[in-house]
Image (spheres, helix red, strand yellow):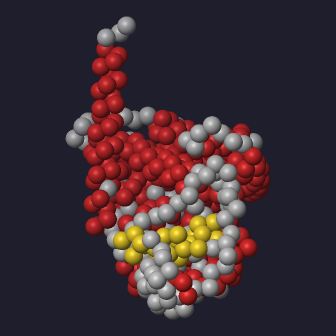
Amino acid sequence: MNETEPLATAILLAAFGAVLATSVLFSRASQRLAVPVALVFLGIGVLAGSEGVLGIPFEDYRFAFRIGTVALVLILFDGGLNTPLTHVRAVARPAGVLATVGVAGTAALVGVAAHLLGFDWPLALLLGAVVSSTDAAAVFTVLKTSGISLKRRVGTTLEVESGLNDPMAVLLTTALTGALLAPGGLSVGQLAFDVTRELVVGAAMGVVVGRAGRLLLGRVRLAAGGLYPALTLGLACLAFGVTTRLHGSGFLAVYVAAVLIGDGPLPFRPGLLRVHDALAWLGQIVMFLVLGLLVFPSRLAEVAGIGLALALFLAVVARPLVVALCLAPFRFPRREVAYVGWVGLRGAVPIILATFPVLAGAPGAGRVFDVVFFIVVVNALVPGATVPWVTRRLGLESGEPPAPRAVLEIESMQPLEGSLLSFHVSEALAVAGVPLRELDFPEGASIVLIVRGRELLAPKGDTALATGDHAYVFARPKDLAWVQLMFGRPESE
């Protein structure tokens, strides 16, 4: 046995563990600074890289691309599982326009600005395509850590847009990289055909995998609860891999499949969602750490002026203008249009897309990568740090009640005939201040737990519901309408 191998593996794991743990611990600082936590991971990757404190030599763009792809699959699948299908349908048209026409418009405007700053047209348009897609994960990380609850339509529009806009950005980047390598080879007709094919095949395969996944999860009984997340992870990988081989958008297929799988009862649902949430966070951390390792700070200084100008142009001019034009037919209020236009953060996708021309050996690709990295960092800071303030300033907080300090869940291998729902007791509800014995509950419904501040209360006949309580109610399907008439909309919706 090679004696260096156990030691080398131990050193590798120790280094990875130290960087991973440091990234997680330092992420707490983002809560106070209102900066996307992904930027913290990215910064630690830079500090650990070739010109950083640890001096880890790394310039493997292919490995970074693969890590980024896997991470995006995990992130998109987790986002889809937590997005109700009814919400997606409500914003499908505006989000779809933003994800297609909006991406193309943003790419064109940034390309023009890059050309005016000295880039040749092929490189300028390529740079615009690379930074054309948004990353709602960064937005909701800021919102979540700042304790702000965004109004549903605005939040869902941003989230669904980010789940749908990757295919357009990927296709534009691929086509323009090819045009850079073979000038004159770009056909607008072929590009339009490719975009349509990717979107149609991606959506269709997402529906197929999603429907098959729901059927499978409803009928198969596995030996342990921990096997269900493994099964859903396998479905996510299948959705991406098979769709990509069929020349469709794997990212779109993953998101659509996850939305359909999550739209209904799932075995061990709470635990399954927690596992995918953890996988998404792990993917995000590792992805940004690896992308940070690729960066050479000395090269960023050379493109700082151009990068800053393009980042500000993207945030202040290109994104808001394109969003205003795309949402004009849908009669969004001005403040919502302004918000969607401002909160168009760029994240991992542009950096990953910037590896495309580098891997293809396109001339000038290294400079494009450096500029894109700079744009992503500045874009995350300028709109990112202002997201909580802008949300309050535009009055787009949802006003939803705070989450209870304790969560009661039922985990079951089989779908059960009944639901455990959480309700926030507001002052406007007729049940507030009324003893439980006086409430007209249906025969198949009952309050099973009350969360009041830091206390857990066992419901009894003389217990009165107080304003601010979180009441957990068990109800059968036939009684849900009556229960919601008493308590309003469940917190879990």
- In front: 354, or 161? 161
In the image, farthest residue toward the top: 1
**Residue 34 horizontal side relative to residue 488, left or right:** left
Q: Is residue 26 visible?
A: yes
In the image, farthest residue toward the left: 53
**Residue 190 horizontal side relative to residue 13, left or right:** right
The percent position of residue 33, horizontal first and vertical second, equals 29, 67
Q: Quadrant of residue 199?
A: bottom right
* Quadrant into which the N terminus falls: top left
Q: Residue at x 67, y 79 (%)?
A: 442
Q: Residue at x 32, y 37 (%)?
A: 17
- In front: 34, or 57? 34
Residue 88 vs 288, above or below: the answer is below
Residue 464 vs 123, above or below: the answer is below
- In front: 198, or 271? 271
**Residue 396 horizontal side relative to residue 487, left or right:** left
The percent position of residue 299, horizontal first and vertical second, equals 32, 47
* Quadrant into which the C terminus falls: bottom right
